[in-house]
Image (cartoon, grey):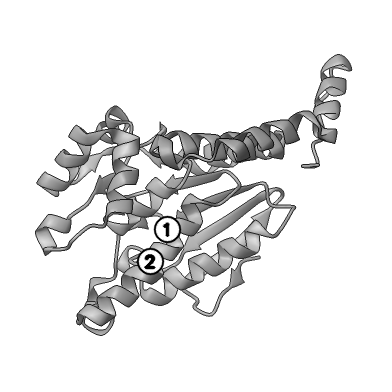
Amino acid sequence: MDDKTKTDKMLSRKEGGVGYVIFNNPERHNAVSLEMWAATTEILEGFRDDADVRVVVITGAGGKSFVSGADISKFESERSSMEAVKHYNAVVGKANQTVYEFSKPTIAMIKGYCIGGGLGLALCCDMRIASDNSKFGVPAAKLGLGYSYPGLKRLVDVVGPAFAKEIFFTGRQFDAGEARDMGLINRVVPVDDLESFVRNYADIIAANAPLTLKSVKFIVGEAVKDESQRNLAHATELVENCFTSQDYIEGRRAFMEKRKPMFTGR
């Protein structure tokens, strides 16, 4: 069953160890309003505290779009003054940061349009798996929008400075093959196979040792920071937690006994 938040434009559900965050505004290609960004944070905080959820998949409803960016029809009510812009940016920034800093693995399952703020959201996920009919782009330069440092930094971390400039300077849409060539997405899958492929990937990840995944996610996140900002002490602590865990014992025993390990995250 889908669980509704305070807005019916955002849905969530759990399937086994996988939690789903679903942008549910298909009549506008899943364009995102302020209340939808706020609900995204709310859903993720619930999944963060749910030990049964090992992986989170973020996707869009309707089959035509992942997320097509901000709902421009709401710009007059949500972003018409500098004060409103600051409030809007704070809510969007919190949602993106919540995804980016989420301690469990995240997958953006992309079908169709992944544009503007949608691409920014996808870049906050650990992996991006897209259908072969997907389209990517950031039309900020066509709208006169400024783009903040955190969002651009995440793009540069994934594709490098030259492709980041190309994406913004042209403002054009790139197909899935071009996005894969840039390193923007991890995998391109036939559109009819996307959901089963992502579900299988999520199940594989969910079956692995949570403490190992948590340590790797944190350490990779530290690696892309400036050296002066890296928390290497916590990185070391997370690695040590793996070696002192029950899961490490379980992993060794399962290997010797030629069976699948049953990890608990402890």
- Which secondary structure, mark 2? helix
Q: Is residue 246 left or right of residue 45?
A: right
Residue lying at 38% horizontally and 63% vertically, measured from the top left:
93
Q: Is residue 42 visible?
A: yes
- Would you place residue 128 above or below residue 75 in this image? above
Of 101 and 129, the residue lying toward us = 101
Residue type at mark 1: give it. Answer: Asn
Q: Quadrant of the N terminus?
A: bottom right
Residue lying at 72% horizontally and 49% vertically, measured from the top left:
16
Give the numbered dot on residue 75: none
Residue position marked by numbered label 2 in the rendering: 92
- Residue extending farthest to the bottom is 77
The reply to whether discs 2 and 1 touch (Cβ–Cβ < 8 Å) is yes
Residue lying at 38% horizontally and 75% vertically, measured from the top left:
34
Q: Quadrant of the C terminus?
A: top right
x and y percentages locating residue 133 in the rendered image = 31, 42
Residue type at mark 2: give it. Answer: Val
Q: Is residue 200 left or right of residue 141?
A: right
x and y percentages locating residue 181 in the rendered image = 28, 27
- Would you place residue 130 above or below residue 87 in this image? above
| Quadrant hosting residue 147 | bottom left
Count of numbered badges drawn on the protein: 2
Of 179 and 229, the residue lying toward us = 229
Of 237 and 210, the residue lying toward us = 237
Residue position marked by numbered label 1 in the rendering: 96
- Between the residue at mark 2 and the residue at mark 1, the CA separation in whole angstroms equals 6 Å
Residue lying at 56% horizontally and 75% vertically, measured from the top left:
5
Q: Is residue 249 left or right of residue 40?
A: right
Assess disc 2: are there few (<14), some (14-19) or many (≥20) residues with their C-alpha within 10 Å of its C-alpha.
many
- Which secondary structure, mark 1? helix
Assess disc 1: are there few (<14), some (14-19) or many (≥20) residues with their C-alpha within 10 Å of its C-alpha.
many
| Quadrant hosting residue 154 | top left
